[in-house]
Amino acid sequence: MRSINPLFENAVIDCVATDRQPSVQELFRVAQRIWSDGAADRSAFRWGRLAPTDTEKLLALRAAQIALSGSVARNE
């Protein structure tokens, strides 16, 4: 499925609508977008220079996971 709103990544719409797990690439793409859109002074190019353990990067990845799954916990 595709998003008709440019604020939402297509992966978010597709994962939630079809109840599928995101790929690693989708997770990182959405996390990067959340991180760079989260503050006006952030450049998307800085994302690649963040340490893997950087708190902001980890928070963005968690937010992306939640956005892509549609909730905090999955019912399985």
Image (cartoon, helix red, strand yellow):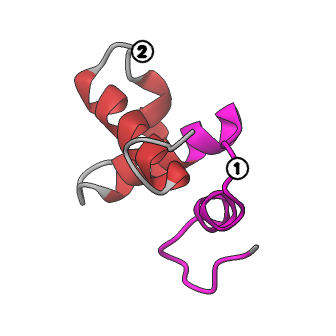
Q: Are circles 2 and 1 on residues that touch, CB within 8 Å? A: no
Of residues 36 and 64, the one nearer the viewer is 64
Please state which of the two labelled residues, at mark 2 or mark 1, is closer to the viewer.
Answer: 1
- Position of residue 61 relative to residue 20, above or below, is above
Total labels drawn = 2
- Per the image, label 2 sits on a secondary structure element best described as loop
Amino acid of disc 2: Pro
Q: Position of residue 66 (x, y in %)?
A: 42, 47
Q: Residue at x 35, y 59 (%)?
A: 37
Residue 14: percent from the left, percent from the top? 69, 64
Read off the magenta span.
2-29
Say which quadrant the N terminus sits in.
bottom right
| Mark 2, residue position | 52
Question: Is residue 19 part of the magenta span, yes or no?
Answer: yes
Crowding around mark 1 (Cα neighbors within 10 Å: few <14, some 14 to 19, many 20+) is few
Of the numbered discs 2 and 1, the one sitting upstream in the chain is: 1
Outermost residue to the front? 76
Question: Which quadrant would residue 55 be assigned to in this image?
Answer: top left
Quadrant showing the C terminus: top right
Residue 20: which disc? 1
Residue at position x 72%, y 76% from top?
2
Q: Residue furthest bottom?
A: 4
Type of amino acid under label 1: Arg
Name which residue lies at 62% across and 68% down: 13
